[in-house]
């Protein structure tokens, strides 16, 4: 208050019973004497409605900003209300409302699938270096190979089970298809997260406009701020989830194409090595 040259002296709680008891079930954390304006400050839950405390004769001035409520008596309220208006809480995920749950689910799904696929598509699990080295040196198929990777499993099937050429190629495609596990969920997140953000934006705007009094007037500023915060935050969070997920999906698709090309090459090399020329037709 000193910076604005406004008087503000802390009073005893029992100095003004009218302000002290103006909100049933809630006590102010301070009563203050200003320049021709006495006021009390309350820290109230977010679900408390300002309109519930409008007194009958209009002698008490009400103003609410987020969880802070000012109740005052006097003619010089505007400077003090202006100071309270400037107190803005930073945007937080709690202002997303119920949309925090579906957006949080999208985020967890995108993070889990992205990291799981990146781990599962490592070269050691799909196409190890020893397989590539054997291909280049003409040392395959090696019966000592186990089934720790997709490439080794294809070699195992070709050398131990003696399938037909079509069966071998089909098994290779199954291994490639297993690499795409979960990618459709990333596509769902890319599409759903912005739509959830848009739905939150519309919901927030409806919340704002539905609180505008039909006969005019300012209404409850806290309702307006909460609705605008939801409208902005849901859009921001939805896009913040969708954009990295889109990048991760594009990277994984490109990585799978690379691994698939390696497995297709391995399959054709196996066909040439295991089957006689007259059987590979």
Image: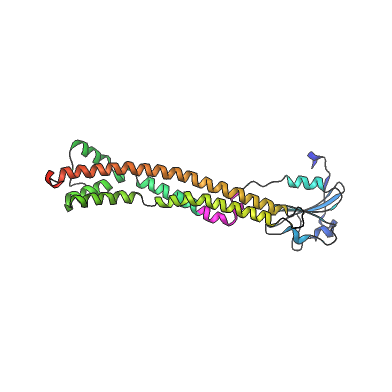
Q: Main secondary structure of the magenta part?
A: helix
Which residue lies at the image location 28% right of the left edge and 52% below the top edge? 174
Quadrant of residue 55 in the image?
Answer: bottom right
Give yes or no for residue 158 being in the magenta stretch. no
Task: Answer yes or no: is residue 52 visible.
Answer: yes
Residue 181: give x, y in percent of width and height: 36, 52
- Magenta stretch: residue 96 in it? yes
- Horizontal placement of 3 versus 251: left or right? right
User: Where is residue 35 shown, x and y percent of the image?
Assistant: 86, 46
In the image, 267 versus 112, the foreground residue is: 267
Total numbered labels: 0
Q: Nearer the viewer, residue 265 or 127?
A: 265
| Quadrant (top left, top right, bottom left, bottom right) of the N terminus | top right
Left or right: residue 281 compared with residue 67: left
Q: How is the image coloured?
A: rainbow
The picture places residue 160, in percent across and down from the top left corner, at 17, 51
Percent position of residue 22, x then y:
80, 60
Left or right: 170, with 214 as reference point? left
Q: Residue at x 77, y 60 (%)?
A: 53
Q: Which residue is the extreme one toward the top?
A: 137
Q: Is residue 149 visible?
A: no
Residue segment shown in magenta = 92-104
- Seen from this angle, which residue lies furthest bottom? 24
């Amino acid at each position: 208050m000193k910076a604005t040259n406004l008087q503000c002296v802390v009073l005893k709680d029992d100095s003004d019973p009218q302000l002290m008891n103006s909100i049933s079930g809630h006590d102010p954390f301070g009563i203050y004497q200003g320049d021709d304006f006495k006021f009390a400050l309350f820290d109230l839950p977010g679900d408390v409605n300002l309109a519930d405390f409008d007194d009958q004769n209009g002698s008490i001035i009400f103003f609410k900003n987020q969880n802070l409520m000012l109740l005052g008596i006097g003619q010089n309220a505007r400077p003090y209300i202006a100071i309270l208006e400037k107190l803005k809480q930073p945007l937080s995920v709690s202002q997303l409302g119920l949309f925090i749950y579906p957006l949080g689910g999208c985020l967890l799904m995108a993070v889990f699938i992205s990291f799981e696929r990146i781990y599962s598509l490592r070269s050691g699990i799909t196409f190890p270096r020893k397989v590539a080295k054997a291909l280049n040196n003409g040392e395959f198929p090696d019966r000592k190979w186990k089934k720790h990777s997709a490439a080794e499993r294809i070699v195992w099937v070709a050398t131990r089970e003696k399938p037909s050429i079509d069966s071998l190629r089909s098994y290779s495609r199954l291994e490639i298809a297993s690499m795409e596990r979960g990618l459709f969920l990333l596509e769902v997140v890319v599409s759903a997260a912005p739509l959830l953000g848009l739905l939150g934006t519309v919901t927030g705007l409806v919340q704002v406009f539905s609180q505008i009094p039909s006969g005019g007037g300012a209404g409850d500023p806290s309702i307006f701020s909460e609705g605008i915060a939801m409208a902005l935050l849901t859009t921001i969070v939805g896009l913040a989830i969708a954009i990295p997920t889109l990048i991760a999906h594009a990277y994984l698709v490109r990585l799978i194409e690379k691994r698939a090309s390696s497995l297709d090459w391995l399959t054709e090399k196996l066909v040439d090595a295991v089957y006689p020329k007259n059987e590979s037709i």
